[in-house]
Every structure is written in structure tokens, then in C-alpha cells.
Amino acid sequence: MSTQYDYDVIFIGAGHGAFDGAPALTAAGKSVAFIEEDKVGGTCPNWGCNAKVILEAPAKLTQTVKQSDGVIAGDAYIDWEKAMARKQEIVNMFPGAIQSGMEEAGIHFIFGHASFKDEHTVTVDGKTVTADQFVIATGQHSHRLDIPGKEYLHDSKDFLSINHVPDRMVIIGAGYIALEAASIMQAAGSKVTVIMKGDQALKGFDRDYTNELVKALADQGVLFIKNADVQGVEQNGAGYTVSASTGSYPANYILDATGRVPNTKNLGLEGLGIDFDEQGIVVNGYLQTTKPNIYATGDVVKKDQPKLTPTATFESQYVADHILGNDNAEINYPAIATTVFTTPRLAQAGITLEEAKANEDKYTIVEQNVMDDWYRLVDFEKTGKRSLIYNKDGQLVGVIELSDKAEDVVNALLPAIEFGYTQKQIKRLVTIFPSIGYSALDNLQ
Ligand SMILES: Cc1cc2nc3c(=O)[nH]c(=O)nc-3n(C[C@H](O)[C@H](O)[C@H](O)COP(=O)(O)OP(=O)(O)OC[C@H]3O[C@@H](n4cnc5c(N)ncnc54)[C@H](O)[C@@H]3O)c2cc1C
Ligand SMILES: NC(=O)c1ccc[n+]([C@@H]2O[C@H](COP(=O)([O-])OP(=O)(O)OC[C@H]3O[C@@H](n4cnc5c(N)ncnc54)[C@H](O)[C@@H]3O)[C@@H](O)[C@H]2O)c1
């Protein structure tokens, strides 16, 4: 326990970059505080993953009903008001539950905006608080297009609280947020147009797969406009018109899903000489900023790894271990699995297919049609493919799958990818039959 400072460690931000690692510090006798200017839990529970996936579940179910060839009879539709009320009811539980869990672990909360005064002092709404060490876990906010009519655009935070289904929705961007929103709102009954800057959705995924996902969503009714430069938005009676280099698109609701920007402003980083740029705060292999007593975790970090909740969790736990001296090695990221929560899902982990295609001397790629597996018929799956990537020692090192169950397949294969199992070792895993885990592991070729 520090006598020189108010706390041993202060986390700025109370999202996954903070709350997954911090309890280990208090358990080891450190005094810890969180400074949070908004909702405890940050983006993921309140206006990210959890909020999104609760709204997405009914969308996936309605699509499954459509794929059931009349086995589930009648037209299923989403009662949006109820879906939103249910989402809100669940989401409302998170901030209180996380805060009380942290308080039980001995962590103090200070509410307000933190800004560094010096390397051991922050000001929070005019008051100063000191600590021996800090962890900047401030996350990101939505990028906003700077175009005429920008005041008519909504971001993902607004969207995840939308209280009605717009007749026509225009989504600008073709990343995770854009495609997930398109999948949900198409299922909810909106006529969705996705305006893409280039001709490929979802950077970081193989183009053959992203093209198939775009085609699947287009078959469901989403209109994709490629290579479009959005120029402005005008109000037009009760609705809006989005003008782009490719034409004009009517909308009742417009989602600006053009990316996320690290929260590095008004933190006093410049005064301390902490390096950062538009991609985030620069850290070394120990997640220390240019001031060694100040770490950074989660989305605010400039990094090659995907900016996802499990990455923030891993970093938060690593920083706690590093502060406690339990781990003195540089952070060693595992294979990070990711999925786009559309129907169908697109999920991957490990060596990407793009990387494997570019290095054929190092990797062997096995292509599979997931519909060759009878089990996929059980839940009315209609289409899907996967690519398995092996190294020259026969170890599974990567997978990408497009299917209704891709996230579970990739999760099932993740231990094999992370720990370098060969086919022979995988065959020793006796899983539950029938199940998606069995299906994922048994059908490796
Ligand atoms: C719509 C959406 C859907 C997503 N879906 C998924 C998903 O399905 N799966 C997944 O893995 N990831 C998903 N993500 C990404 C995931 O939410 C983030 O990777 C994760 O929340 C990062 O955690 P963090 O702690 O770094 O930042 P955050 O959760 O953003 O927390 C940062 C906190 O810091 C606070 N803060 C900022 N500046 C200050 C300051 N100066 N003083 C005090 N407090 C401050 C903020 O209020 C915030 O609470 C999604 C993101 C979005 C936007
Ligand atoms: N399922 C998940 O795990 C999940 C879901 C949502 C978000 N996230 C995280 O949040 C991050 C942010 O998501 P996102 O979808 O906002 O960002 P993104 O980086 O995935 O996609 C941004 C999209 O906006 C487009 N774009 C950029 N500038 C544009 C412009 N001027 N005009 C038109 N289009 C433009 C890009 O081409 C890209 O398609 C993701 O990268 C991911 O890390 C994860």
C-alpha cells in the first residue's frame, strides 16, 4: 500500500481493459481506483458486444425460421419494441453488477473525466488524485464523417438504442459494425442499403469469404453500393437523402459506421510527452507508454492485434501480472479468435487465409464445404465453407469459416491452433456427439 500516493494503481476507464485485471492487484494488497466518466463497464456491455448480441439473437432466429423450409410454420417477425426493451433490461444490469463486484474486491470508484497533471497526478473535475502507477484504458469512440448534413448521422451507440424499425436505412461503411447492423435491421424489416468506400467489406478477412458474406446478405435483401464516395446528407420531408458519387439513396435513418477513434484527447498526454497517434497510444512490449509507470490497455493502444474485448481482457490481466512482478516477459499474444455477428457469421483465428495464400511454401490450405457434414442440417443451415491452415509439421495454425455456427466452430478449434495440435492429437479429443464441437473437430481433413 502506497504511503506517498493516494493509490498504488489508478485505471483511467472502467471497461474490460480495467476490470478484468484489476482485482488481482487488490488481492495482492495493492490499493486501486478506477476513474470513469460514463457508464461502468465501458463500451462492450453498455453499447458494444453485449447490447448488440442481445438484439442480434432475434434476427438470427427469424433467419433460421426462413431457412427451415416450413418445418417451423408461419411468419416469424421481430417485435422491435419488445426486443429493445429486453436488450435494455439486460444491459441495465451490467454497470451496477460490475461496480459492486469491483467494490467487493476493494476497488474505489471516482466518477468524472481524468486528465494527467504530471506522471503521478491526474485531475478529475478540478480535484487531484495521485498514484504510483496508472493504466490508461480509455477505449475508443465512433469516427464521424465530416460532410454536409453530418448532424443527421447516427453512430453505433445511437443505433443500439434505436426505438423503431426505419422503413429505409442507409449504413455508411462495411466493417464489423456496418454488416452486423445491416444483418439485424434487414431481419427486423428495414430496407437496408450499405454504402462501401471500396469494393471489399471487412478488412482483415479473406476476400473470397467477405464476398460470399456480402452475397449472402444481398440474397437476404441488403443492397450493397460499392466504390462510393459519400458526399452529403439532406433532409427531405420526413426522411433524408444520402448523396454519393454513385447516386442518391433515400433513408429514414442513417448509420455512420466508418470506424472507431482512440480516446487520447484531453488526457494531458501531450504535456507528459506520451507518444500517441491516430491509431492509439504507443506502448512497448510490456504495455508501458513512454512513461514507464503509465501503462495502456485495450482499444486505446496502438497495436496489430484486433481491438476486441478478449484482447482488452488479456492485456488487462497481463498488466496486473507485470505490475505484481508475476510476469516479467514481454506480452505474448495468443491466437485471437474473432467473428462478425451476421447471419451467416464469418469467424477466424490464427494465421489468416490471406497470409497462408501469400506463403504457400510455409502453409497447406484445406478447403471444405461445411454442408458436407450432415450435422449442419439439424439447425437448418443452408450454406457455408471453411479453410483450414496447416504448417509443414502438420499442426493446425489457422481457420476461417463462413456459416451460421462459425463462431462456435472457431472456438472449438482454438485450443488446437493455440497449442499447435496435430491431427493425431486432435483425434484424442472425445467430444459430445452430436454437437457443433464434435462436428468442428471430427471433420478436419
Ligand atoms: C457496436 C460495437 C460492437 C462491438 N462488438 C464486439 C463483439 O461482439 N466482440 C468483441 O470482442 N468486441 C466488440 N466490440 C469491441 C469492444 O467493445 C472493445 O474492444 C472493448 O470494449 C474495449 O474495451 P476497453 O476497456 O479498451 O474500452 P472501453 O470499453 O471503451 O472502455 C473505456 C472507458 O473509458 C472511459 N473513459 C474514456 N476517457 C476517459 C477519461 N479521460 N476519464 C475517465 N474515463 C474515461 C469511457 O467512458 C469508457 O467507459 C464492439 C464495439 C462496438 C462499438
Ligand atoms: N463482432 C465484433 O467482434 C465487433 C463488432 C463491432 C465492432 N468491433 C470492433 O470495433 C471496431 C470498429 O468497428 P467499425 O465497424 O466501426 O470499424 P471497421 O474498421 O471494422 O470498419 C470501418 C468501415 O468504414 C469504412 N470507411 C472508413 N472511412 C469511410 C468513409 N469516409 N466513407 C465510407 N466508408 C468509410 C471502411 O472502409 C470500413 O469498411 C472493429 O474494428 C472491431 O475491432 C468488433
Image (cartoon, rainbow, N blue to C red):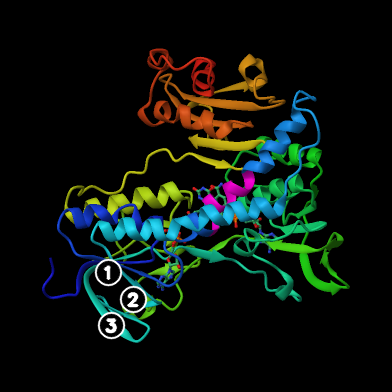
Q: First in sequence: mark 3 or mark 1?
A: 3
The residue that disc 1 covers is 291
The residue that disc 3 covers is 128
Please say if 310 is above or below 91.
Answer: above
Please say if 443 is above or below 130.
Answer: above
Choose top left, top right, bottom left or bottom right for residue 303. Answer: bottom left
The residue that disc 2 covers is 273
Q: What amino acid does circle 2 point to?
A: Gly
Give the residue drawn at x 73%, y 46%: 78
Task: Tell me where the magenta segment starts and ends, as one range.
Answer: 47-56
Give the residue drawn at x 60%, y 66%: 143
Q: What amino acid does circle 1 point to?
A: Lys
Q: Main secondary structure of the magenta part?
A: helix
**Residue placed most toward the observer, 99 or 193:** 99
> Residue 306 location, x and y as percent?
48, 49
Q: How crowded is mark 1: few (under 14 residues within 10 Å), some or many (20 or more)?
A: some
Q: Is residue 48 magenta?
A: yes
Please state if 215 lies on the left or on the right of 359 as rendered: right
Secondary element at image label 3: strand
Q: First in sequence: mark 1 or mark 2?
A: 2
Q: Are marks 1 and 2 in contact (CB under 8 Å)?
A: yes
User: Is residue 240 visible in the rendered structure shown here?
Assistant: yes
**Residue placed most toward the observer, 292 or 50:** 50
